[in-house]
Image (cartoon, rainbow, N blue to C red):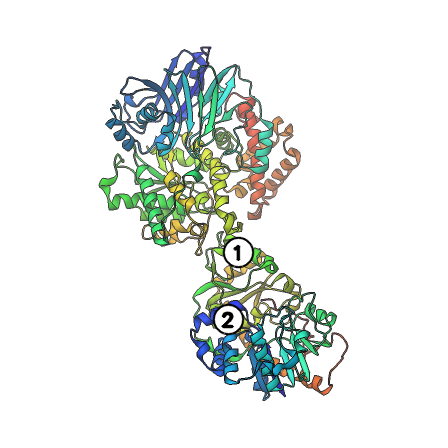
Amino acid sequence: MKFFQIALFYDQYLADFNRRHPGREEESFERQQKLLFGDGFSACHYFAEGMAELGHETMMVVANDSGSQLAWQKQNPFSPGDQGSHGPTGAWGSCVPPALLEILLEQIRRFEPDVLYLQDPISLDSRFVAMISPRPKMVVAWRASEVPRKTDWSDIDLLVSNHTPSLLAGKKKGARWQEFLQPGFPVRLARAMEGIAESREVVFSGQLSPLHRRRTEILTGLAMDQMGAGGGFGLHYAVNAGSETPAGVAMHAQAPVYGKEMYEFLKSGRICLNIHAELATQTGGNMRVFEATAMGSFLLTDLGREDHGLFRPGQEIETFRSRQELLQKIIHYLEHPDARIRIARAGQARCLQDFSLRKTAENLEKLLQQGLAAGRSRRSFFRWVNFRPGLRPVPAGGCAG
Amino acid sequence: MCGIAGFYGFGKSPDAGALNQITDALSHRGPDGRGIWQQGPVGLGHRRLAILDLSPAGACPMVCRGPDGRECVITYNGEVYNFLELRAELEKEGYRFQSETDTEVVGAAYLRWGKECLPRFNGMWALAIWDPKEWNLFLARDRFGIKPLHYLWHQGILYFASELKAFCALPEFRRKLNRGYAAEALRKSQPLEGTSEETLMEGVKKLLPGHRMEIDREGRWKREKWWETRDHLAAPPANLEKQVAAWRELFLDAVRLRLRSDVPVATSLSGGLDSSAVAAGMYLLEKENPGGLTRAPRDWRRSFCSVFPGTALDETAYAEETARATGSPCRLTVFNDPPAGGAIEESVWTMEDVSPALAVPVVENYRAMRSQGVWVSLDGHGADEMLGGYGWYLAEPMQSLNDRLYLEFHQTLLPSILRNFDRCSMASGVEVRMPFMDWRLVCLSFALPAELKIGRGYTKWILREAMKDILPERIRLRRSKIGFNSPMVDWFNRGLGGLARRVIESPAWRSCRLFPARKIGQEILAAEAGKSLGSADWEKALHWWTCLNLVLWETMFLESPGKRPVGAA
């Protein structure tokens, strides 16, 4: 099958990537892609890479990355008029500038995919799909966070997510079929980080926003507790701190880290802290759970309802339910490195075995084969898929890292 | 140093006996001498703690003269550390001095510059100056309220004194609880010292920090604020390195000035960063430039600390490490058990207000100092409020952190701490000096961005950075913060040495309507019986103590003329 994936990366990440790779826009499209995907930003979503491992013909583009997209255009000249009456408008507020949207449509037209995979179906929803001619046989989208009111998924064939509310929203917004799917981590990235030594005590990487008030409170509380009995350990928060950020977070803050730098950061911590966003806390499972365990870091995370069963607390990861428990466990595991290392190793083994990119691609492949066989499937709402024989179906978890 | 008192009767000539009584009620503040000066309607009293020029020439009240023959009379509590520099300036203008005190320099400065002398002083003070030519009485407190000054209008006469308890000695003054203040003090614990003129005793006011007051012959009085820190903030140096260097230089200079003393000096160590920094600063100054310490005593390498072995508040190891590093042997006052009830009552009498702190260990620390022949202590107060040392600051958004610090430094928390440490130290005739309260350092600190205070992984970052290569790294980079307080939880589990039950069974407790006395009493006794309090009950224990504190205060300050134990016949 021909699988085409459209990714959109944070502007902050792309700016950071450009800073770390000066002059990369002069490189070929292929070379820039290698650099980008080698950096591993949002790697849990590299489904095209996983599908390629299974022998499918794939293409993945970062639609809002002007460097690589303009290089593609340079290597594959086309006239803007080639898109005919479906010329891009960006009228629904897409974060892809019109010139890059033209390139994207041309890439799809030339690749002629069976399956189009939208990693961000908020910026590129059905109104974007309507611009594609000819329409791929199947349009698949991923969402594991809030869904804005005006989103249109009426032309989405399959919505996949590890976040129950997103699957429910998929139904409301018109997606024809919704399926639970866990993301997967590329083993190659985990292997590339093996040489990174632990040089920090407690690390946290993530976003701060109005959707992360609880996260901010926990990080602030931890900074306060660090000053109390048993405290004194080092805290390192890679966050987007601003003037409204509490002093307790800001004092431990460094610039946000992305891609390889983030994996190195996670790997450098003796304890890797994870705190879900409010939305995801209701359900669980943000990307950090996979990214940290895949790195071989000791993950100490709060637990959403649907995290149960992903990893075994106390054996593969550790969990906390309160500020007090968080402090106790930090102190305990800093004082007991053997236990910490044992858990981190078991967590990594479990992640790379059950939540590898290849495993996810296999699960996705099954869905796509079913979908393609059935044409435009119109299955009943909310059909749980148990990808892990012997275990209870895992309810969805959020992706709000 | 010292305790001051006095009156101004305008048309009347108040009873000299009253002046004697309110002055002698402050004898603990000045065990080294006593002075009374009265002329017509004005009387000034003084209890002397002799620190600069121990001779009789340094006695107060002191008559000061200008080169034009003009005179003033001063009674004065405090230290103006830059008195040597001011004296040299005044000498150039023809002023001559009879003593080696700062008191005489302060008097001369008043004669030279009038009330505008105050901004020239670097130090702490509460003073009264009588200008016999103008028949004008001038009262003033230092910028931040380190030294206290209370006043009372009674029967048309203005009385003033260093402490509240002096007014208990005033004949015919009917003492009453200021219920509004008491209720507020119970509710907020420490909000009133820097913002309200009120005190627990109705009618007795305090002159607020950074304020002065003038009363003329007609009895017209004017009270005004003479100091506002934010009006004196200068632009800090341009880059980080220079900011740290400037801060360090000012801090060390603040320590240097505060070593001016004709009697031995020591440090009060808590084991924390601030007091350790002061001790290390002293050590460094002598090591690097012993000749630069003008008028410093030879004996200053001693330190004192109250410790609580076996409790979460024990900092013995840290205090001893600083003592070793600075070559100042540490004398520990060890609290293995709750203090006796009598000692707690004494601390309430000493503190003369409602405070969430049970002050016995502080009182005992300074008592130990005095017993060892030391009556000047350099302490670390002010750094936590100025540089964001407390945990609760971490919840403050960075954009408002400096405002919060400004408020707690000038109006709420620090003024209460300054009051407590003045009372606790002066109860034993020990003067506490505070390098972090040097106005130049305060102005620089508040001009700096918030991230230099809480940033780069640490609270009080600039202090830590400035102390590089001066303090042992274990102390300098220590993150844990243990406020200097008594182990209240442990002590409540042991009934405060029997005092809690005695207070709860007293008529004063039973008749108190400012808090649910019956319920709280039961809770306190239940905690003692079951030894049930844990570290999570800290706030509760503090509240219980403020209630006990208030009832003890009422009993001692209103019902009894002095320190009569609660429940005693």
Write down the quadrant of residue B440 in the picture. Answer: top left
- Measuring from the top left, give residue B192's x and y in whole percent: 53, 34
Write down the quadrant of residue A351 in the picture. Answer: bottom right
In the rendered image, the residue lying farthest to the left is B291
Pointers 1 and 2 within a single chain: yes
Mark 1 falls within which chain?
A
Q: Which residue is mark 2?
A: A14
At 31% from the left and 28% from the top, the residue drawn is: B102
Distance from the alpha carbon under mark 1 to that under mark 2: 31 Å
Label ID, residue A222? 1
- Above or below residue B172? Residue B77 is below
Q: Quadrant of the C terminus of chain A?
A: bottom right
Name the kind of residue labelled 1 in the image. Leu
Secondary structure found at label 1: helix
- A372 lies left or right of B243: right
- Above or below residue B457? Residue B223 is above
- B250 lies left or right of B543: left
- A398 lies left or right of A29: right
Mark 2 falls within which chain?
A
Name the kind of residue labelled 2 in the image. Leu
- Measuring from the top left, give residue B513's x and y in whole percent: 65, 30
The number of numbered discs placed on residues in the rendered structure image is: 2
1 or 2: mark nearer the eye: 2
Q: Quadrant of the N terminus of chain A?
A: bottom right
Tell me which label, 1 or 2, sits earlier in the chain: 2
- Measuring from the top left, give residue B50's x and y in whole percent: 32, 27
- Measuring from the top left, give residue A366's x and y in whole percent: 67, 84
Within 10 angstroms of label 2, few (less than 14), some, or many (20 or more) residues? some
